[in-house]
Amino acid sequence: MKIPDIVIAVDGYSSTGKSTFAKLVAKEFGFLYLDSGALYRGVTLFALEQGLIEGTDKINTSALIPLLDGIDLRFDAERGTCIGDRCIESEIRTLRVSNSVSPIATIPAVRNFVDSKLHEFGRRGRIIMDGRDIGTTVFPDAELKIFMVADDQVRAQRRFDEMVMKGQSPVFEEVLANLKERDYIDSHRETSPLQRAADAFVMDNSDMNLHEEVVWIRGLIQGKFGILG
């Protein structure tokens, strides 16, 4: 199926499988995949390593902001998210980073920094991007917007299983609590809160597998853009 050179914005709650879905769509239809959440996690990892975060939410914002432009965040086609030549893909997926990423993402200067990076990458065209404010703030004119949701227990189990596969030793109750806390922070932050764009299509994938998700978006694209076959 040949689809036009559109921008696809994928938003939604934590652990709804946004990144997995977006990567699959990118591969299926020949799009460039951009992971906005990875950039926020990269900034969070940087702040942690610089000693700018105490606990999970006490951030030395005044010290962090001047350093933002010097963070060489980039996407590598083979290795994923990097700071300069250093691959940080595994490090940004730890619970340590997860516990602090939402407070970091509420800082307007951080959001502006990440948005500038995304717009830089997005100028290449024919992209799919996932995050929490892609369809409302980053690319409000995206031709196709999707908002992903799933049951809390299902999301927590997915995140738990992912962490176990990476050799970590999570506690399910802590993972669930972290997801709920992030949902609240993301939905109530002053700058670019997580919310469904008015023209976004909702996908509840609590009981869907990846094949069913591809079938779903294929049908959506065919119907929205009048594509036959």
Image: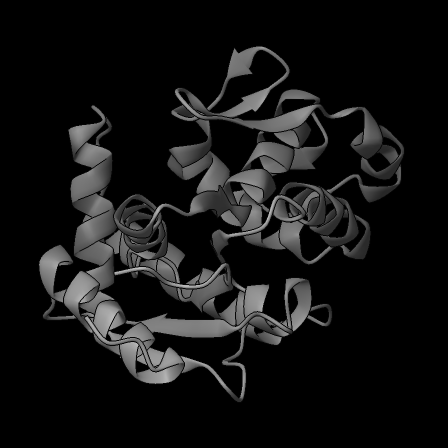
| Quadrant location, the C terminus | bottom left
- Judge whether 167 appears above or below 9 on screen: above
Residue closest to the far bottom: 198
Query: Dividing the picture into quarters, in which one does residue 161 lie?
Result: top left
The residue sitting at 68% across, 31% down in the picture is: 47
Question: Residue 72 location, x and y as percent?
Answer: 70, 23
Q: Is residue 209 visible?
A: no
Judged left or right of residue 144, residue 227 is left
Observer-nearest residue: 22 or 109?
Answer: 22
Question: Residue 52 location, x and y as percent?
Answer: 72, 31
Judged left or right of residue 175, residue 216 is left
The residue sitting at 26% across, 49% down in the picture is: 28
In this figure, what is the number of numbered marks?
0
Observer-nearest residue: 11 or 142?
Answer: 142
Q: Is residue 10 visible?
A: yes
Query: Dividing the picture into quarters, in which one does residue 90 lie?
Result: top left
- Judge whether 147 appears above or below 74 on screen: below
The residue sitting at 65% across, 47% down in the picture is: 118
Observer-nearest residue: 157 or 15?
Answer: 15
| Quadrant location, the N terminus | bottom left
The residue sitting at 40% across, 66% down in the picture is: 13
Question: Residue 169 location, x and y as percent?
Answer: 21, 31
How did the renderer colour the structure?
Answer: one colour
